Amino acid sequence: MQVQDYRLEAPFRAILSELAAVLAVQRVEAWATGGFLRDVLLGQEVKDLDITVAANPLELGPRIADTFGGDYFPLDAERRRVRILLPDHEMHLDLMPLASSMEDDLWSRDFTIDAMAAPLNELASGSMRLIDPTAGLPDLGDRIVRHVSEQALLEDPLRLLRGVRLAVLLDFAIEPKTREAIHRHSGLVSEVATERQRDEVVQILRTSRAARGLRLMDDLDLLDRVLPEFAVTRGVEQPKEHYWDVFNHCLAVVEALDMILSEDEPQADLAKSLWNELWTRLEWWAGGRTYFSEEFVPNTHRCSLTKLAGLLHDIGKPQTKAVDDTGRMRFFGHANAGAQIAAGLMHRLRFSSRETALVGEMIDAHMRPVQMAQQGAPSRKAIYRFFRDTGEAGIDTLFLSLADHLGTAGPRVDMENWRRHVAVIDYVLRMRLEERVVVEPPKLVDGDDLMSALGIPPGPRLGELLELVREAQAAGDVITRDDAIALARREL
């Protein structure tokens, strides 16, 4: 099938032309495949290249890397898959070996929309012959995720999760027989290495439809198998101010984060009003709209971890639930308990210690933005303590608080209450980003100064006095070195 109606940006066309020329010199046939070709056909922004070659990528990779001045490393030495980083273009190129024939190769893939190929030199020229034995192009047009075969899912059960990820990433529907097959074999996902499960979940959370992805995982019996710790939240009743039980509340918080963290204005009327109220108020924050799209650690973005915290923020409620003498439900200590449960979950899925700490801090502190503002605008001292305790999770926690507000109210959300909550977050953010003395007071005295001035020995009390000085600086009560020493002397 000849295809001409596709868009390929000039930089990509140049890279493909150069790559095709290099491979021609090597007398190596090559095809564009996988997600790269799918995105080209959809007219979406292309970020990385998937290339299948009739050669050994382990031998070919270093030569291509040298040509482009990039770095090369094996992704899977056993399967002879390699990755070449192209730093000048901020992208990577994945090389895979051809099976016995291109059609056989495509029939062995997971989903039809990723089981197409085109000769590399033709793609670069602007007109290509599409190789599509599994009818992926019609499925692309119909916005359907369909498995190539049920056997393909069994060969690598991670594909069960990948089907969900493709559906939410592209906003496609999973074809009914494919849904049935995924549900039927959902138990096999437990056999997949936990870090591979983690990577798929993180990518689902990175999309703007993360809540839909989690609900789809639940419908297909995948959620409890990948995140069994979360199952305890099902059916746990909450006080009347909560519209949902704990399970659905947590999913509603993720849905709220999908909306809040979107870089683009939502289409639905209510979501548009809520989003505009927030981001109009935060127009002064130059990097606000892109803050959550930053990588926190390689391959994991802040938005994914914030949504994970949103999903897990009340996971401690089932074990802390109690009913007092008046019949009111209480969840004393649920934030701290939830942080500990989340830490165990993230350790099991092999998240890094830094990622685990970020999510744990968000969960542990998710109620504090509201608590700080119970008597009006938060005090400078309260804001100092909040950012001291939450560290690099502070800003993320503020947005989790906003999402928690929406997830609590559900469809009963009141715009005036939302406006007040946004005003609190705006105020605290301004203090964090524009009033640095509140968050990081400059050092006026150190331990040696206080020991010399007050005649006290080193020890825990010295550290307490220094912290009192910093808090007083943040509050604006201590300005000079003499002020600091005088305060410490009064506290002795």
Image: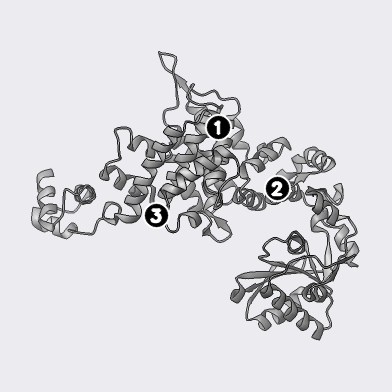
- What residue is disc 3 on? 284
Residue 123 x/y as whole percent:
79, 72
Q: Mark 3 and mark 1 in contact (Cβ < 8 Å)? A: no
Residue ID for mark 1: 249
- The first of marks 2 and 1 along the sequence is 2
Q: Amino acid at mark 1?
A: His
Instruction: Give the residue at x 55% y 55%.
Output: 301
| Inter-mark Cα distance, 1 to 3 | 31 Å
Residue 298 versus residue 15: which sits nearer the camera? 15
- Residue count near mark 2 (Cα–Cα under 10 Å), binned few <14, some 14–19, many ≥20: some
Q: Spatial distance from mark 2 to mark 1, Cα to Cα?
A: 23 Å
- Residue 234 in the image: above or below residue 260: above
Viewer-nearest residue: 229 or 34:
34
Q: Is residue 148 above or below residue 314?
A: below
Three-letter code, disc 3: Trp
Horizontally, is 385 left or right of 43 in the view? left
Q: Which residue corresponds to mark 2?
A: 171
